[in-house]
């Protein structure tokens, strides 16, 4: 019966779809690869060994591996063989401040792969306050993905529907929600809404993330500085001093303690925020501190640059601070007071930034970093002697995998893990520049920065996508990675609930004679 209806064109279509599926299968499964003679570097240690990759997974890690016939051989002698980077904080194609970030899920991810990052977690925004619609809209944006990605969801208002949608999204692979205590009139939530959100996160086993700046005071600061006649990008830094970040961080940390739920403080840009995170961790509270690459390498002087293009490019929130903050943030990261490094990659080109000429309050906030992160961390933290290559792997990959419940599928080179692998050659010197980067933005906040060490090969799920300066990426091959709730940060939390929050106990005391004496 099938035979009868089979015409030439039908046959052609069937053949092409079979060939397409075959190509996709070969594409998805990736080739057999043997990486020889490199120093396999995981967060928990290093060894000189060979790595066999098959079907998109790490198959073997051992010395003197035999090279199967037809396998691709990569010579990694003198190089580090590391898990691909995981960037837990990005904003691709984000609608924000009247603009849309100019890197989408293809260009942003291609840039990431060229810089050794093989997975990112993007912030999906609700659409008109609707979380489910926001999720669907971001899934559509991600259809052109060329590497693995996950989503956090932002919560910008509160209602019974928002609470219900959070519970639904947790079943769809989102295990973290972000609350903004800044961006008044746009993304900001009140303390009441934030508390509701924290309690819901605890209930469903999702990590609460917070953008911690006092949005009310920032609004006053912006008006004050602007009316003082300071309208340029430097006004952005002056309007939101670091102690407004400190205030909001301490408030968020204490509200999370009140609810007894883990808290993840995004983009800790100042000593003030770091001290609050460190203080909370010192009293055993589950608080994660996430500096971003710009805070490790840049300082606020860029915003005082007379060239508006350069100054506006450095406008992000919380602002990039004075050099003294950078030193402390690097030390806190080296000392384990901060746990991982992200980028907050949110790119607006100079035309988009120029809408803020004459009024810093409308310059779209955000900087680049998705391609530069590993190189900036390597230069600022390893080449400076502050951390070891294993620490480097922890703060650029493993910690994110563990926090977001992806470990050991991601974040480690071990049999059974996804074959997301980079080769970093410490002997290759290069300079960062908008002229050579892969992002769509026409500026680069790290312009001219010299880096000693370079990611020379990137392997994404068993396929070589970056090699000797050549990108080999295809839209639509990226995969949404589901992240399960109740991750490691939630283990044993309920014990804390049981162990009453008050030394005198929290069981009702039977007070006698009170009423009847009246
Ligand atoms: O606040 C964020 O994380 C977004 C809106 C990106 N922009 C920024 O300046 N950080
Ligand atoms: Zn933020
Ligand atoms: Zn962000």
Image: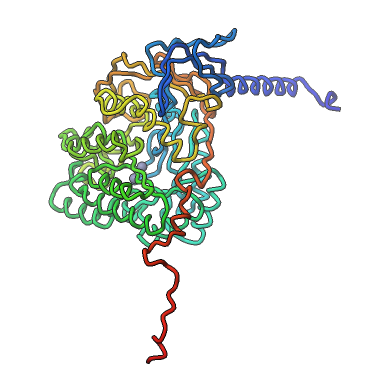
User: What is the residue that sits farthest to the right in this orientation?
Assistant: 1
Front-lying residue, 436 or 241: 241
Q: In this rendering, does residue 2 appear at all?
A: yes
Quadrant for residue 399, please give it. top left
Quadrant for residue 444, please give it. top left
Query: Which percent across, then down, holds residue 395?
Result: 36, 33
Depicted 256 relative to depicted 502: above or below? above
Query: Which percent across, then down, holds residue 162?
Result: 49, 57
Tell me what residue is drawn at x 62 percent, y 22 percent.
25
Depicted 404 relative to depicted 222: above or below? above
User: What is the residue that sits farthest to the left in this orientation?
Assistant: 228
Query: Which percent across, then down, holds residue 514?
Result: 39, 86
Front-lying residue, 366 or 114: 114
Q: Is residue 74 left or right of residue 341?
A: right
Which quarter of the rendered picture does the C terminus lie within?
bottom left
Q: Is residue 440 left or right of residue 149?
A: left
Quadrant of the rendered image holding ligand 2: top left
Depicted 316 relative to depicted 372: above or below? below
Tell me what residue is drawn at x 30 percent, y 40 percent.
337
Q: In this rendering, does residue 350 appear at all?
A: no
User: What is the residue that sits farthest to the top in this orientation?
Assistant: 69
Tell me what residue is drawn at x 25 percent, y 40 percent.
315
Front-lying residue, 360 or 184: 184
Which quarter of the rendered picture does the N terminus lie within?
top right
Query: Which percent across, then down, holds residue 181?
Result: 33, 53
């Amino acid at each position: 019966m099938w035979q009868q209806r089979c015409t030439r064109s039908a046959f052609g279509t069937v053949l092409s779809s079979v060939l397409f599926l075959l190509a996709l299968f070969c594409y998805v499964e990736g080739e057999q690869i043997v990486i020889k003679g490199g120093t396999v570097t995981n967060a928990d240690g290093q060894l000189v060994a060979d790595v066999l990759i098959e079907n998109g997974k790490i198959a073997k890690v051992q010395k003197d591996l035999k090279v199967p016939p037809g396998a691709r051989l990569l010579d990694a002698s003198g190089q580090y063989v590391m898990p691909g980077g995981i960037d837990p904080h990005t904003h691709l194609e984000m609608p924000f401040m009247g603009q849309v970030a100019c890197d989408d899920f293809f260009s942003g991810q291609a840039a990431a792969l060229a810089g050794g990052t093989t997975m990112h977690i993007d912030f999906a925004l609700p659409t008109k306050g609707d979380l489910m619609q926001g999720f669907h809209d971001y899934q559509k944006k991600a259809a052109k993905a060329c590497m693995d990605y996950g989503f956090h969801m932002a919560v910008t208002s509160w209602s019974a529907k928002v609470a219900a949608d959070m519970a639904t999204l947790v079943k769809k692979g989102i295990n973290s929600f972000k609350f903004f205590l800044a961006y008044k009139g746009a993304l900001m939530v009140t303390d009441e809404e934030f508390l509701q959100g924290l309690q819901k996160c605890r209930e469903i086993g999702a990590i609460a993330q917070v953008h911690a700046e006092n949005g009310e005071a920032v609004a006053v600061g912006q008006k004050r500085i602007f009316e003082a006649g300071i309208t340029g990008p430097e006004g952005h830094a002056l309007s939101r001093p670091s102690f407004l970040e400190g205030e909001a961080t301490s408030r968020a940390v204490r509200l999370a303690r009140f609810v007894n739920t883990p808290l993840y403080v995004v983009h800790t840009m100042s000593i003030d925020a770091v001290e609050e995170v460190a203080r909370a961790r010192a009293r055993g509270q589950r608080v994660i501190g996430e500096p971003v690459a710009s805070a490790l390498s840049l300082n606020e002087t860029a915003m005082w640059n007379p060239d508006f293009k350069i100054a506006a490019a450095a406008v992000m929130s919380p602002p990039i601070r004075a050099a003294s903050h950078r030193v402390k943030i690097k030390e806190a990261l080296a000392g384990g007071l901060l746990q991982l490094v992200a980028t907050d990659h949110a790119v607006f080109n100079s035309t988009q930034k120029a809408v803020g000429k004459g009024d810093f309050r409308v310059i779209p906030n955000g900087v680049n970093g998705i391609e530069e992160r590993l190189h900036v961390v390597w230069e600022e933290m390893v080449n400076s002697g502050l951390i070891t290559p294993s620490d480097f792997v922890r703060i650029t990959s493993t910690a994110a995998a563990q926090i977001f419940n992806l470990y050991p599928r991601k974040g480690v080179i071990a049999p059974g893990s996804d074959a997301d692998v980079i080769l970093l050659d410490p002997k290759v010197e290069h300079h960062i520049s908008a002229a050579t980067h892969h992002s769509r933005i026409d500026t680069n906040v790290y312009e001219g920065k010299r880096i000693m060490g370079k990611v020379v090969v990137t392997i994404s799920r068993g396929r070589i996508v970056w090699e000797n300066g050549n990108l080999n990426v295809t839209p639509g091959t990226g995969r949404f990675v589901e992240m399960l709730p109740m991750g490691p940060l939630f283990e044993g939390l309920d014990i804390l609930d049981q162990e009453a929050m008050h030394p005198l106990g929290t069981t009702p005391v039977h007070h006698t004679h009170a009423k009847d004496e009246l």
